[in-house]
Amino acid sequence: MGFGVPAMSISTSQPGATIQPGQDSLSGAEVLLRALKDQGVEVIFGYPGGAVLPIYDALFQQNAIRHILVRHEQAAVHAAEGYARSTGRVGVVLVTSGPGATNAVTGLVDALMDSIPVVCLTGQVPTHLIGNDAFQEADTTGITRPATKHNYLVKRPEDLARVVHEAFYVARSGRPGPVVIDLPKDVVIARAPYTAPPTLAHRSYRPQTEPDGGQIARAVALLKAAKRPMVYTCGGVINAGDAASAALVAFVRETGLPCTSTLMGLGAYPASDPQFLGMLGMHGTYEANLAMHGCDVLLNVGARFDDRVTGRLNAFSPGSRKIHIDIDPSSINKNVPVEVPVIADAGRALEALRAAWRADATRPDTQALAEWWRQIETWRAVDCLRFVQDTAPGSIIKPQHAVRRLFEITRQQGRETFITTEVGQHQMWAAQHFHFDRPNHWMTSGWLGTMGYGLPAAMGVQIAHPDALVIDIAGEASILMNIQEMGTLAQYRMPVKVFILNNEYMGMVRQWQELLHGGRYSESYSAALPDFVKLAESFHAVGLRAKTIDDLDRVILEMLAVDRPVIADICVDQKENCFPMIPSGAAHNEMILGPQHESRAAGITDEGLVLV
Amino acid sequence: MASPFDTTFRSATISVLVENESGVLARVIGLFSGRGYNIDSLTVAPVDRERQQSRINIVTSGTEMVIEQIKAQLDRLVPVHRVADLTREGPHVAREMALMKVVGRGEPRVEALRIADAFRARVVDTTVESFIFELTGSTEKIDAFQELMRPLGLAEVSRTGVAAIARGVGAI
């Protein structure tokens, strides 16, 4: 540690005790960095400014914690999310007061919605100026209160270390989320005592992680008696760690149940396993959605029955008795009433379920389960994700084909591969055609749907996994929302690959306008696009372009071969729509499978139209 | 426990024991406004200065599913120690205090005083043409008194909102 003072006996010094010169005289900024170090922090994503200058000065004088300078504070939070999501650790952000903090808000809400553990340190004007409309002052705790799991304003130097330790505990415990610590400049300049991380339980926040035995028994009884059971998983399994994913696989394989996942949960159950039915929901597979609709017992693990998954609520899985495992009691009965709630960590609950399943002497109805699987296989045979790629020379590239080839080639090469996405059609095609067999390798803005998430998130992943292959599957519109981060890639020599499916439209907007708004493409054309190849070059990266099917594999191979940041501009079919699709306000069994069913969208009621 | 499938509206008196720290009331109020829950009344005051705890009493209404959501959402706020649904957890006492200014002369003034006496309201200020009544009781009782005062020159009302506590030996 390079704090310039012996980092010892700080917390044991008694008030009034003789203070040796050089001891007990850490500044608030030094206390902050020491607390971060004790929390295991290795990297911070941030951007300096007036209110955080003392913290940056302390950062300069130490080597334990690395700082990654982003180009915009929103990107700092997304990078921390990518870091957190790919490692299971807490991501850390440091921004200045006022605009630094307000720029971070989108990232904070993104982390809140997707339950990603992030601690965001924001500078603040000195305590005596708070409320004075000082330069670069914003009511950061007020603004971020609904944008965070919890936030703190540290008004006294003696509270600093305790608050930092508590913030990390809150961010990673229970349902994880972002926590803001607002740090007035005088507090980080003043001398402050250091206290080590507490060993006692938090005085009020103690989430329940162990499942209730009675509810587990009821869940097993329901599942054993089921004729058409179904498992539906989400990000809760991934947040619960590798052990939870392993417990999920063990339980599903042992019981022989069909399993689907939301967008956020992809990878928790291996996509290549025959018991996996693919993603469910608005752009989910035919077999997953019809199995959800037709099942008689539904086991939800760490998902929240959100509107992208349920479609029309009163037609959602109408005949099923429902079991819901969630660490957050407020997720239970929020959207869909359930019969058996299990408040617990997903991994602990799945292990308990498996143990209870084994201990229970009742035999499951294997004949009914076999019949159910036969039914599911007929749905699977529809092959709902198929598309037709014309392979004649000069043919236009189908976006699905581009993702499929990217997946196949990276799999052949066998490198550890992480995928991030922006938001829109490309995100759904990535989810449908890029398959994940392990958790924590898929980073996407699922709930907030933040365009501009993918590139900074990929930076965070690459910092955490310097030798891995990190690809941002992007759209040409989304990528421009945080394109400035190409500069960060160059500065830190991060070989992130940006794979743009360029259809010159905000594709998902265009698709909805085509299907639901009479083909009036209001403001959805990506006019005046930059030349992405030249843009890459100006940011010291490699620019590649695939104009037709003849170029695609060569561009992918070249992109993967270069040990530098790359933008690959893949010119794809502008008219391609993302199918299957459950139009808003429709039920799972009212899917549009392809262009031949597009007229079904015309039947959407006004009630459906108001939904997003 | 009532079924989450029940769609009838009910009123709920919820007591929340919170850490007495800055912003905690804003968190609770923000939760209600942000999620579109009703607040019929809300009171807050420190109740244990040594342990730095305050108590918030909220009267709200909604379907069983919404009330359960409100309780779960409150309970997951970091500075919340305990959430008690007094309406569900057994009999409880709920009281409000109100101050009402009634302005008038002659017969209405006499009638106001007569009714105040029947309601056991205290006169805490008087001039030749006004009274301020202090009244404690259930929300319904105070509503009733307020309605009776309206034609008799009711000029101003100040109500505290509900303070509530469960009956019996149990404590929050």
Image: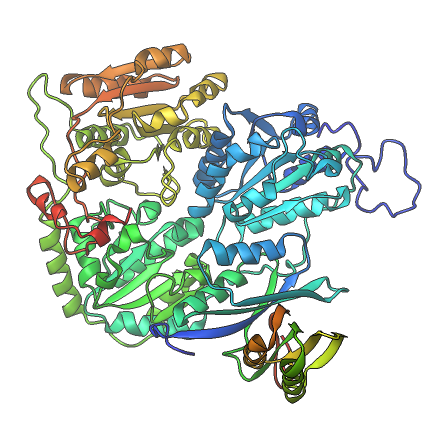
Residue at image position (27%, 56%) is A310
> Is B122 drawn above or below residue B79 in the view shown?
below
Quadrant for residue A440, please give it.
top left
Report if residue A43 is visible in the image. Answer: no
Residue B51 in the image, given as x and y percentages of width and height: 73, 64
Task: Name the one closer to the observer, B10 or A415.
Answer: B10
Residue at image position (71%, 44%) is A161
**For residue A583, side relative to residue A388 (left or right):** right
> Is A319 drawn above or below residue A515 in the view shown?
below
Residue B16 in the image, given as x and y percentages of width and height: 59, 67
Quadrant for residue B162, please give it.
bottom right
**For residue A2, side relative to residue A148 (left or right):** right
Tally the numbered discs.
Answer: 0
**For residue A379, side relative to residue A65 (left or right):** left
> Is A566 drawn above or below residue B4 in the view shown?
above
Q: Quadrant of the N terminus of chain A?
A: top right
Quadrant for residue A453, please give it.
top left
Task: Name the one closer to the observer, B7 or A536.
Answer: B7
Residue at image position (81%, 42%) is A9
Residue A55 in the image, given as x and y percentages of width and height: 68, 29
Report if residue B105 is visible in the image. Answer: yes
Task: Name the one closer to the observer, A213 or B18.
Answer: B18
